[in-house]
Image: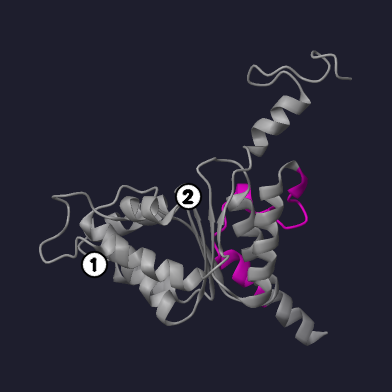
Amino acid sequence: MREQRIWGQQIQKNLRLARIPKLLQKCSFQSFDPTFHPDARKMLTASLEALETGSSLILASAICGNGKTHLAVSLLHASLGQGKRGLYLSVPHLAEVLRNEVSGGYSGEGALRFIEKAEVLVLDDLGKANSSGFMAERMYALINSRYLNEQQTIFTTNHEYPEDLEKALSPPPGRTREGGDPSIGRSIISRLIQMCGAGRWILSRAPDYRMVQAKENGRVFGFRGKEEKGEV
């Protein structure tokens, strides 16, 4: 009984340290509906396989609201339940944290060292933050560290193909710091492809599930429900 209590306390501690936003705390594999589109089932299958194998994974879709973040956080929740240390990070929020550290006279290394301790890391919305020479270098340092140490990392992105994500992760001309590498975006993508391997860069064309529900459930955001269309 004592061991079970200690184990439960450790899981609760890990859950608090994971910094999962309140809205996402109820995300689980059980609450995900894979029936609304074949690509939703494809993402679910890949996420369950990543949970079992400990492999890294990229869930990519230009369409918002189709379950990328839900499944990434579900995998994180399941990993926390196994006693692993995990962390959720929105990449735009991470960029803000790093900028604040720099403006305070720090290098950003402190935040990165904290992140590197996570056995399972969710990086949500990779490529969404405005890139600069500094941000590109910090993102390279983080991903390269996890690549070298074979730490499981789950990425979501609105950039469907490697070349699009590379462009988003590369600083535009004139924003590469002195001595910086203008091809750093390509270096990041190379590591992502190696980390995630064949079959773990999952492209989804599933629609926005929230919009699907809105259309099904009634006149929401201007959509007519089944009753108004004579379907019920």
Type of amino acid at the residue the image marks with label 2? Glu
Disc 2/disc 1 C-alpha distance (Å): 31 Å
The disc label shown at residue 107, or none? 1
For the residue carrying disc 2, how many other residues have a C-alpha within 10 Å: few (<14), some (14-19), or many (20+)?
A: many
Q: Nearer the viewer, mark 2 or mark 1?
A: 2
Residue 84 left/right relative to 183:
right
- The quarter of the rendered structure image containing the C terminus is top right
Q: First in sequence, mark 2 or 1: give its number.
A: 1
Residue at the right extreme?
Answer: 232
Residue 204 visible in rendering: yes
Stretch of the chain drawn in magenta: 10-35
For the residue carrying disc 1, how many other residues have a C-alpha within 10 Å: few (<14), some (14-19), or many (20+)?
A: some
How far from the left and from the top, in percent, is residue 221?
63, 20
Instruction: Please name the residue that numbered disc 2 is placed on.
Output: 160
Q: Quadrant of residue 91?
A: bottom left
Type of amino acid at the residue the image marks with label 1? Ser
